[in-house]
Amino acid sequence: MKVAIFCGSRSDKPTMKISEEILNKFNIKNQTYVISAHRLPDILSHTIREIESVKEVEVIIAGAGLSAHLPGIIASKTILPVIGVPILDKKNGLLGGMDALFSIVQMPKDVPVATVGINNAYNAALLSVHILAVKYKEIKESLLKFRKDKLFTKIEK
């Protein structure tokens, strides 16, 4: 089992690193790619085909800022579940990340992208864990323990 993580640019990597950390906590193999949907569409298409040929990849997480086409472009090229992470571009983002959020969440019919909150790579990783937990018993057990531990930690505080 494996999750592919895509960043639209290098500046998205620090936000998306959180997804890697969460997946690693659950011992889920993952690999991160930095490929712009606008600047490198052919390389993106080739990479998606390559990922699909590796039967281990079952979920894709894609983070992007501003016009945030990356998750939607990926979803249009694969039937693997895609989770979009809208990223606030601190240098150029005049709309506080809302531009990225709307670009991802407003996908046309027939090309769905699950979308989490702005900069919420944490929830994107957890959603991918939930998706994999449907199929893999060991991930389901880890997820149930994780949720139980989180709940009791919050109650004790």
Image (cartoon, rainbow, N blue to C red):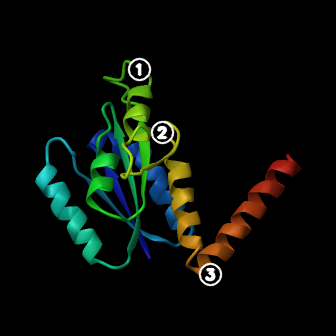
Alpha-carbon span between mark 2 and mark 3: 29 Å
The secondary structure type at the circle numbered 1 is loop
Q: Quadrant of residue 149?
A: bottom right
- Of mark 2 and mark 3, the one earlier in the sequence is 2
Residue located at (53% from left, 39% from top): 117
Q: Quadrant of residue 69?
A: top left
Q: Amino acid at mark 3?
A: Lys
- In the rendered image, residue 18, in percent from the top left (x then y), is placed at 48, 51
Numbered circle sitting on residue 116: none
Q: Along the line of sight, which residue is nearer the eye, 128 or 114?
A: 114
Residue located at (59% from left, 73% from top): 134
Q: Which residue is mark 3?
A: 137
Q: Along the line of sight, which residue is nearer the eye, 40 or 153?
A: 40
Q: Which residue is mark 2?
A: 119
Q: Quadrant of the N terminus?
A: bottom left
The secondary structure type at the circle numbered 3 is helix
Q: Along the line of sight, which residue is nearer the eye, 68 or 122?
A: 68
Do the residues under discs 1 and 2 have CB atoms within 8 angstroms? no
- Of mark 1 and mark 2, the one earlier in the sequence is 1
- In the rendered image, residue 75, in percent from the top left (x then y), is placed at 33, 55
Residue located at (50% from left, 66% from top): 24
Q: Amino acid at mark 1?
A: Leu
Q: Which residue is mark 1?
A: 95
Q: Along the line of sight, which residue is nearer the eye, 6 or 116?
A: 116
For disc 2, the neighbor class at 10 Å (few under 14, some 14 to 19, many from 20) is many
- Of mark 3 and mark 1, the one earlier in the sequence is 1
Alpha-carbon span between mark 3 and mark 1: 42 Å
- In the rendered image, residue 31, in percent from the top left (x then y), is placed at 35, 64
Mark in front: 1 vs 2: 1
Mark in front: 2 vs 3: 3
Q: Is residue 26 left or right of residue 109?
A: right
For disc 1, the neighbor class at 10 Å (few under 14, some 14 to 19, many from 20) is few
